Structures are given as C-alpha cells and as structure tokens.
Image: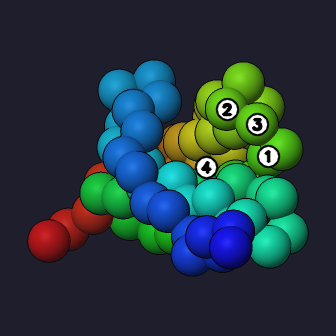
Amino acid sequence: MTDLRPWIRPMLINGHDAVVEFDPVTGIYHGEFTGLGNRVYFYGADEEQMVAEGRRALAMFLHQGECRGIDTKDSE
C-alpha cells in the first residue's frame, strides 16, 4: 500500500526560513515562509522549481514592503 500522508520539511531560501509540504495525492509541493510579517506562499512540481518560485515570491513580497514602507519581518 502506498503511503499517501503528506510530508513536511524545512527549507532555507535566500536566508529566509520556509516550510515545505509535499502532497502525494496531487504531486505538488506547497511552501510557506515563516518569520515574515505576512504569509508568503509558493508552489512547485519539484525541489528546483520550489526554490525558484520561493525566490520569486520572496522578492515580490520584500519589494512590495519596501515600496510601501512596511516592515516585512514578523513582529513576534
């Protein structure tokens, strides 16, 4: 019998922590950065795409924060 439970692991992208979950039912990786002032999600079909999409999503988030003068770090 195939194990269909998702697995979760940490990932570091451009110095920022993220948590990545793989859903074996859909075959898609879902990532979320932690320690930021807002939720930043990214998705991919494999680890290489996850890193690329994570970098893209992080850059967009940090740029928007800079443009708006918003602190992008988590206040906790």
**Residue 27 higher or lower than 76, as above or below:** above
Q: In the rendered image, which quarter contains the N terminus?
A: bottom right
Separation of marks 1 and 3 at Cα, in angstroms: 6 Å
Judged from the image, the secondary structure of the residue bearing numbered disc 1 is strand
Q: Are marks 1 and 2 in contact (CB under 8 Å)?
A: yes
Q: Are marks 2 and 4 in contact (CB under 8 Å)?
A: no
- Of pointers 2 and 4, the one earlier in the residue sequence: 2
Q: Is disc 3 surrounded by few (<14), some (14 to 19) or many (20+) residues within 10 Å?
A: few
Judged from the image, the secondary structure of the residue bearing numbered disc 2 is helix
Residue type, numbered disc 4: Phe
Residue 60 point in image, percent of width and height: 69, 42
Separation of marks 4 and 3 at Cα, in angstroms: 22 Å
Select label 2 or label 4 by which is in front.
Answer: 2
Residue at left offset 36%, top offset 58%: 34
In the image, 19: left or right of 40? Answer: left
Separation of marks 3 and 2 at Cα, in angstroms: 4 Å
Q: Are marks 4 and 3 in contact (CB under 8 Å)?
A: no
Residue marked by disc 2: 47
Residue type, numbered disc 1: Gly
Select label 1 or label 3 by which is in front.
Answer: 3
Q: Is disc 2 surrounded by few (<14), some (14 to 19) or many (20+) residues within 10 Å?
A: few
In the image, 56: left or right of 3? Answer: right
Residue type, numbered disc 2: Glu
Residue marked by disc 1: 44
Separation of marks 1 and 4 at Cα, in angstroms: 18 Å
Residue at left offset 20%, top offset 68%: 75
Residue type, numbered disc 3: Asp
Residue marked by disc 4: 61
In this orientation, which residue lies closer to the viewer: 1 or 67?
A: 1
Total number of numbered discs in the rendering: 4
Residue marked by disc 3: 46
Judged from the image, the secondary structure of the residue bearing numbered disc 4 is helix
